Image (tube, rainbow, N blue to C red):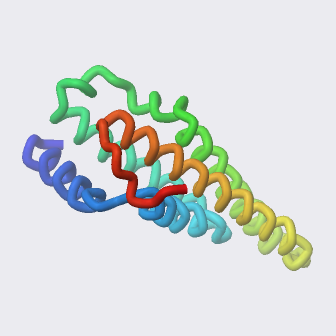
Amino acid sequence: MSGSEVNELKNRFMDQIKDIDQIGIFINNAKIALGMFVPFLGVGLGIFSGFSTGMVFNAIAATSANLNDVSPLLILITPFGLMEIVAYGLAISRSGMLFYSLLKRKYWREYLLSTLVEIGVVVILLLSGAIIEWEMITRLNGLSDTRISI
C-alpha cells in the first residue's frame, strides 16, 4: 500500500475504535463469528476477516516505530487472541459441516443442537476474550477508568 493508503486505513480504523469498550469489542467479534456459522459463506468471511485484520495491523505497524519489527502473528499468543482463534475456528468448521450436510442432502436438523451449543461456546469465548482484551488495553495504556465494571 502507498503511504496515503496506509494513513487512510489507519485513520479509519482509529475512528472506528475511539470509543470502544468491552461490549464494543465483543459485539464486533461476535458479528464476525456468528457470520462464520453460515454454511459455505463462513469460510469466505473468515478469510476476509483475517485479511482485513492483517491489513489494519500492517497499516498501524508501518506508522508506528514501536510495532515496526513486530510480527502480526504475535497477537495469536495473547489470551484473547487464542480465545478468538478457537471461537472463529469452531464457527468456520461448523460452517463447513453444515455446508457438507446440505450438499449430501442429509437431515440438517440433526446438527441443530450441536450448532446451538457451539454458538454458546463461541459467545462465551468472545465475551471472555473481550473482557481480557479490554483489561490489557487499559493496563497497557495506564487507563484507570474502565467503562464497564465486571
Pick the quarter of the image with the N terminus: top left
142 sits left or right of 139 in the view: left
Position of residue 32 relative to residue 13, above or below, is below
Kindly indicate the quadrant of the structure image that contains residue 20: bottom left
Instruction: Give the residue at x 65% y 61%.
Output: 123
Q: Report x, y in % for residue 128.
A: 60, 51
Instruction: Give the residue at x 64% y 71%.
Output: 38
Kindly indicate the quadrant of the structure image that contains residue 12: bottom left
Query: Does residue 41 appear in this view?
Result: no
Instruction: Give the residue at x 70% y 53%.
Output: 90
Position of residue 122 relative to residue 64, above or below, is below
105 sits left or right of 140 in the view: right
Position of residue 118 relative to residue 7, above or below, is below
Q: Report x, y in % for residue 31.
A: 51, 68
- Return the residue nearer the eye: 140 or 59: 140
Query: Does residue 121 appear in this view?
Result: yes
Instruction: Give the residue at x 30% y 36%.
Output: 142
Q: Report x, y in % for residue 150.
A: 55, 56
- Return the residue nearer the eye: 96 or 72: 72
- Return the residue nearer the eye: 136 or 10: 136
Position of residue 105 relative to residue 37, above or below, is below
Residue furthest to the top in view is: 69
Q: How many marks?
A: 0
Residue furthest to the left in view is: 4
111 sits left or right of 14 in the view: right
